[in-house]
Amino acid sequence: MPSKRSIFEEVGETPKQTATPGGIDKAGQGARGAIRIWLMVLFALVVIMIAVGGLTRLTDSGLSITEWKPVTGALPPISAEAWTEEFDKYRAIPEYQLQNKGMTLEEFKVIYWWEWGHRQLGRVIGVVWAAGFLLFLATKKIPTGWTGRLLFIGALGGLQGFIGWWMVSSGLREGMLDVASYRLATHLGLAFVILSFIAWYIYRLGRTQAELLQARRSADAGLSRLSNVLIGFAFLQILIGALVAGIDAGRAYPDWPLMAGGFLPPQPFDLQPIWRNFFEDAGLVQFMHRMAGYILFLFSIFVWLRARKSANRRTQAAFNMVIAMMFIQMLLGIVTVIYSAPWHIAILHQFGAVLLWAMILRGRFLAQYPIPQSVRG
């Protein structure tokens, strides 16, 4: 039972309680730095995965493995009998019968290794995610509120594996020489969604929770909203680019700025029903990619001009990088078309899309969480 205190007791005799600096960060902080490095590794692996996937498509290797075996498929054929069995499976699908008839076993091995490497890299990404997540979870190093976010990345990765097989299976059907372009667009689009979350988490973990709370008070709401629209336009362009890749539309009209001497390609709506033209007509799909690129470029200039009004120099610099990369990407797209999409230029164009995507996300992040600067800027 607490003792009674005298009404004449000096207030100064009461022990003083002092606030602990940085208390908001120490509570549930976890291993932010280590998790950030782990996410950087995952980001790099996903970027490599996108590049390998693009090369797999450009080399027509995606249908060389006709089965989905997430575990046992990690082991490639070793014996001559195993190679013959895999080759026989490939010779049973339309791509071989209608396009590659007469291919030798050695030629088959080339495309097989491309697709096997693509799938194997997906398995590596899954292992890196699982190992890191379970380690941080077991050691209780995950910051408060981050367990669900990190688990969500893994769930998206698992979904991507399923979408990958859903895409490949479309190319095994009667009369198909390639995978369905809209499924390819779904597969690539999800890859960029995964990149988005990983990049955003990397940006957030680079600052303490207290710094983020403080920075948000200085957020540029207008620039953030414009950045959201820019992200939406960029994502739409990425999806249309996947449609271009899916039907080799980049090689259809190697002239610019016109298409076969006209603004529109010849007979853009010949296929029936008419909606098929927006996915399967090479001329119309390339035209859509061009027009979407022009709109994206013009809107990015508008966002950049708005960003120049920002009081934060680092936010301005982030959008300077966006507009510079946007210009480079547009030039790469024109060169890709003029030279009929050779693999080395096409993959550079795809890599440019990844860089641009990360830069737009960084600009969006700095608009919402500006880095403090001195009064002099």
Image (spheres, rainbow, N blue to C red):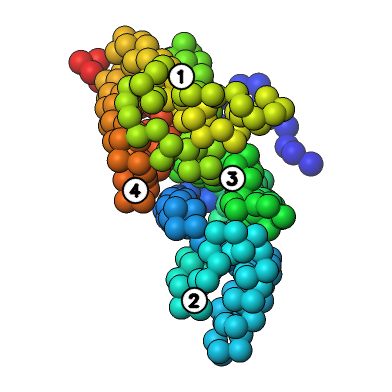
- The reply to whether discs 1 and 2 touch (Cβ–Cβ < 8 Å) is no
The residue to which callout 1 is attached is 264
The residue to which callout 3 is attached is 184
| Residue 137 picture location, percent across and down | 62, 59
Q: Which badge, 1 or 2, comes first in the chain's sequence?
A: 2
Nearest the viewer among 48 and 331 is 331
| Residue 63 picture location, percent across and down | 59, 61
Nearest the viewer among 49 and 368 is 49
- The reply to whether discs 3 and 1 touch (Cβ–Cβ < 8 Å) is no
User: In the image, is 92 to the left or to the right of 60?
Assistant: right
Quadrant where the image shows the N terminus: top right
Whether residue 94 is visible here, answered yes or no, is: yes
CA separation, marks 1 and 2? 41 Å
CA separation, marks 2 and 3? 27 Å
| Residue 119 picture location, percent across and down | 56, 64
CA separation, marks 4 and 3? 19 Å
Which marked residue is nearer to the observer: mark 3 or mark 1?
A: 1
- The reply to whether discs 4 and 2 touch (Cβ–Cβ < 8 Å) is no
The residue to which callout 2 is attached is 104
Q: Which mark is residue 342?
A: 4
CA separation, marks 4 and 2? 24 Å
Count neighbours of disc 1 (C-alpha within 10 A) and say few if under 14, some if 14 to 19, many if 20 or more. Answer: some
Which marked residue is nearer to the observer: mark 2 or mark 3?
A: 2
